[in-house]
């Protein structure tokens, strides 16, 4: 069962505070560090930026008088929006603001 958005910061803080790191696994320049917890993984409702943008639930624009690449994202969705770095974010940003900025 998803929690209300008002509870999300507290729930995530509690969960993230319970995480412990395990022994890093190394291979050349890559290190993978396992995370362990005795807590149950919380259910948090969110949309990715690409999902929210496709549903017209976010507005992406350049912030007035800001230096590149400062953007303003207005969330109109009923849930949180998770913004990840990667190709889908670049597509949203290039269609939601001045391209190549």
Image (spheres, grey):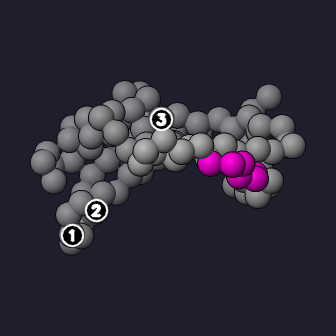
Front residue of 30/36: it is: 30
Front residue of 69/77: it is: 69
Mark identifier at residue 70: 2
Q: Which residue is mark 1?
A: 67
Residue at (24%, 60%) from the top-left corner?
69
Residue 58 in the magenta stretch? The answer is: no
Of callouts 3 and 1, which one flags the residue occurring earlier in the amino acid sequence? 3
- Kindly check if marks 1 and 2 are in contact, taking CB atoms under 8 A apart as contact: yes
Residue at (21%, 69%) from the top-left corner?
67
Task: Kindly state the secondary structure of the residue where label 2 is placed.
Answer: loop
Q: Which segment is the magenta one?
A: 19-24
Q: Provide residue 87's location: percent of width, then percent of height.
A: 30, 35
Mark identifier at residue 48: 3
- Report the label total: 3
- Whether residue 8 appears in this view of the structure is no
Picture quadrant of residue 59: top left
Examine the residues drawn in magenta and state their main secondary structure: loop
Residue at (58%, 36%) from the top-left corner?
46
């Amino acid at each position: 069962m998803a929690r209300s958005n008002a509870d999300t910061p507290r729930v995530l803080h509690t969960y993230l505070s319970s995480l412990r790191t395990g022994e890093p696994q190394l291979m050349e320049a890559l290190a993978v560090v396992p995370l362990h917890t005795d807590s149950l993984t919380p259910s948090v409702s969110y949309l990715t930026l690409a999902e929210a943008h496709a549903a017209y639930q976010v507005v992406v624009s350049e912030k007035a008088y800001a230096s590149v690449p400062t953007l303003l994202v207005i969330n109109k969705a009923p849930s949180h929006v998770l913004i990840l770095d990667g190709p889908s974010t670049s597509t949203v940003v290039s269609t939601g603001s001045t391209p190549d900025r």
